[in-house]
Structures are given as structure tokens and as C-alpha cells.
């Protein structure tokens, strides 16, 4: 089984590497954006699927990552403007971690619907600040994001967004996915699973439930910040729309569609949801109606998500084969 997964991973990497060479530039751009949302969804799942905490306000960190990048590129900063993508990523990680630590310390005192609604309140406050602090955030117009340098190299506009930055985003995605895989399979990750199953029993056996939930929250916030920081240069502009309760709902749907109890579930869900949304928007102005029906269909047909269904089928196949 492990050999099969390694072979599948190698094939997947080779396919991902050659895609920009054979597909139209627009789809390379879409794929880059999808990977950014996959990072966002993967981070959210350590909170939702692994720890059992449902947040309705996690777009807060997607927005913080994006606005951190935009703010550090503002012309008003003069010689202190930052164009290095590596430094911008680091700044987004630090900012998201600090905010996540503060917000998480308040939110993890509660569970279930109360946890979700408190997070919803925070993202609504953040969205209101983005709208009202016009001289800082640009209000509804948002802030422009300029072309950053990657590994010290600055490329032309079109080459950056439709080719070179794809490989940069893919590399970051592979790194953070590996890190998350190690977290999932560490004693800490298994403790989070125990907390999800029964928090009271987990506390009785000596697991510091509060601290572990807070750690999961901060990790999730960092991944949201990374996704937002990578998405910002692709978008070219950040606006308050990146941090709304609707954007927060998108990541919940990504996890449910892909399978929140499977490691690859949020990644598959992000690719399915975002690309389905893009394709439907091309054909009709009633895209939200059709997208909603599609989501209902997938949830009814695959109640455990795409990867949950696939995992069940594979277990049956290998069980019969044995």
C-alpha cells in the first residue's frame, strides 16, 4: 500500500510539473489560485476535521495574510517597501499567528455552535474595519498588490502570474502539506483526534485540551495566512470581499465535499469546489443557484466526502483481494 501511495505521489508531481506547459495560461492561473485555497482548506481541517471545532469565520486569516502582503507593498512606505515574497510570507505567518493566538484564546473556551458564532463575529468585525478604515485599507476599493520577487528574481507581469509563480505556489504547497502530514501523524495530532472524539475523556487521561485546541487554532490561522499571502499577488488587488462570512463558508464546503476526516479531503474539496464554481460562472449568471444544487448533490451522494467514499471503496477492494 505504501509503495502504491509513493508511486501515485510521483505521478501526481510529474503531472503538476508539466501542466503549465500544455494547458492555456488562464488555466495555469486558475490552478495557482486553487492551490492557494487548498492550503487554506488544509489548515482549516486541522481545526474542523481533526479537532472537531467548526468555525464560521476563518476567512479572517485569509484576509490577514492578503492584506499583510498588500500593506507591506504600499508606496507610502518608500524605501521600506517589501517586495521579497519570502519576507512577505514570513510577515503573513507572524501576523496570522499573533491574531490567531489572541482570537483563539477567546474562542477555544467554547465549543460547538458557540465556537462557530464567535469566530463569525470576529470576521464580521474585521470586514467592517476593512470597509470603514478607508485611508488605511482602501475601503471597498481595496489595496493594489504589485509583482513580488521570488528567490530574488522579478519577472514580467504575464510570466509571473501565468507560469513562474505557479511553481512557487506548488513548492510552498508541497512543503506545508508535508508539515501538516507530520502534524497529523504525531502524538499531538493523535491527541487532537482524541479531543474530537471525546474532550472530557481526553482531559481525564492528562491531555491539556485547552492548550491543544489553541495550538490547532493557531496552526490553522497560519495556514490561512499563507494561503492569503500567496493568493494576493495572483489577484493583483485585495478587497474586503476576501474576508466575509461567505468566504468562510466556502472553506467549510471544501472540507465537507472532499471529506473532512481524510487528510487529502480538503485538498480535493478545494479543487472540486473552486473549479466547479469557476466553470459554472462562465456559463450563467445564476451560478450560485447551480453551485448550491451541485453542493447538495455531492453531500447527498457522498456523505463522507469524495475521499471518504473513495477510501471506503479502496478498503473493500483490498479486503476482498486479501
Image (spheres, rainbow, N blue to C red):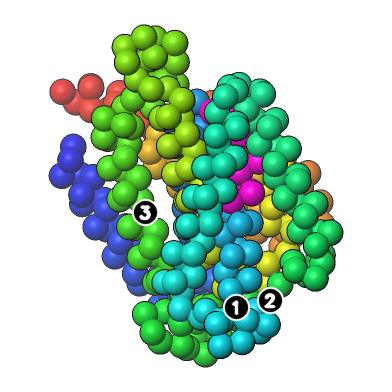
Which circle marks residue 176 in the picture? 3
- Return the residue at label 1: 73
Choose top left, top right, bottom left or bottom right for residue 208.
top left
Left or right for 166, reference 253: left
Dividing the image into 4 quarters, which one contains the N terminus? Answer: top left
Pointers 1 and 3 in contact (CB under 8 A)? no
Q: Where is residue 239 in the image (x, y as percent from the top left)?
A: 73, 64
Whether residue 289 appears in this view of the structure is yes
For the point 37% across and 15% down, the residue is: 202
Using the numbered discs, state the Cα–Cα distance from disc 1 to disc 3 in whole angstroms. Answer: 24 Å
What element does badge 1 sit on? loop
Whether residue 228 appears in this view of the structure is no
Front-most of 100 and 23?
A: 100
Among the two numbered marks 1 and 3 on one chain, the one whose residue lies closer to the N terminus: 1
Which circle marks residue 144 in the picture? 2
Q: Where is residue 3 in the image (x, y as percent from the top left)?
A: 15, 44
For the point 66% across and 41% down, the residue is: 57
> Is 68 one of the magenta-colored residues?
no
Front-most of 68 and 269?
A: 68
Front-most of 148 and 256?
A: 148
> Is 60 one of the magenta-colored residues?
yes
- Label 1 or label 3, whichever lies nearer to me, is 1
Left or right for 185, reference 289: left
Pointers 1 and 2 in contact (CB under 8 A)? yes
For the point 51% across and 80% down, the residue is: 83
Point out the stretch of residues depicted in magenta.
53-61
Amino acid at each position: 500500500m505504501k509503495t502504491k501511495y509513493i508511486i501515485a505521489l510521483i505521478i501526481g508531481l510529474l503531472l503538476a510539473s508539466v501542466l503549465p506547459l500544455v494547458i492555456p495560461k488562464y488555466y495555469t492561473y486558475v490552478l495557482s489560485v486553487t492551490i492557494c485555497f487548498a492550503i487554506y482548506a488544509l489548515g482549516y481541517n486541522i481545526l474542523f476535521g481533526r479537532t472537531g471545532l467548526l468555525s464560521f469565520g476563518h476567512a479572517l486569516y485569509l484576509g490577514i495574510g492578503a492584506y499583510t502582503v498588500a500593506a507591506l507593498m504600499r508606496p507610502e512606505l518608500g524605501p521600506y517597501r517589501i517586495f521579497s515574497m519570502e519576507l512577505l510570507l514570513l510577515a503573513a505567518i507572524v501576523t496570522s499567528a499573533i491574531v490567531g493566538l489572541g482570537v483563539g484564546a477567546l474562542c477555544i473556551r467554547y465549543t460547538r455552535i458557540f465556537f462557530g458564532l464567535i469566530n463569525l463575529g470576529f470576521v464580521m468585525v474585521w470586514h467592517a474595519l476593512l470597509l470603514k478604515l478607508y485611508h488605511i485599507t482602501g475601503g471597498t476599493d481595496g489595496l493594489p498588490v504589485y509583482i513580488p520577487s521570488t528567490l530574488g528574481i522579478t519577472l514580467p507581469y504575464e510570466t509571473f502570474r501565468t507560469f513562474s509563480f505557479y511553481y512557487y505556489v506548488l513548492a510552498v504547497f508541497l512543503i506545508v502539506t508535508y508539515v501538516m502530514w507530520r502534524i497529523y501523524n504525531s502524538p499531538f495530532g493523535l491527541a487532537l483526534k482524541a479531543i474530537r472524539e471525546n474532550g472530557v475523556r481526553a482531559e481525564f487521561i492528562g491531555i491539556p485540551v485547552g492548550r491543544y485546541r489553541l495550538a490547532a487554532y493557531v496552526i490553522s490561522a497560519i495556514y490561512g495566512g499563507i494561503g492569503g499571502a500567496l493568493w494576493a499577488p495572483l489577484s493583483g488587488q485585495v478587497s474586503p470581499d476576501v474576508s466575509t462570512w461567505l468566504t468562510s463558508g466556502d472553506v467549510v464546503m471544501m472540507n465537507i465535499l472532499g471529506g473532512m476526516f481524510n487528510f487529502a479531503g480538503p485538498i480535493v474539496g478545494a479543487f472540486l469546489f473552486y473549479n466547479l464554481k469557476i466553470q459554472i460562472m462562465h456559463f450563467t449568471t445564476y451560478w450560485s443557484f447551480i453551485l448550491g444544487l451541485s453542493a447538495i448533490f455531492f453531500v447527498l451522494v457522498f456523505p463522507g466526502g469524495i475521499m471518504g467514499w473513495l477510501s471506503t471503496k479502496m478498503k473493500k477492494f483490498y479486503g476482498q483481494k486479501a
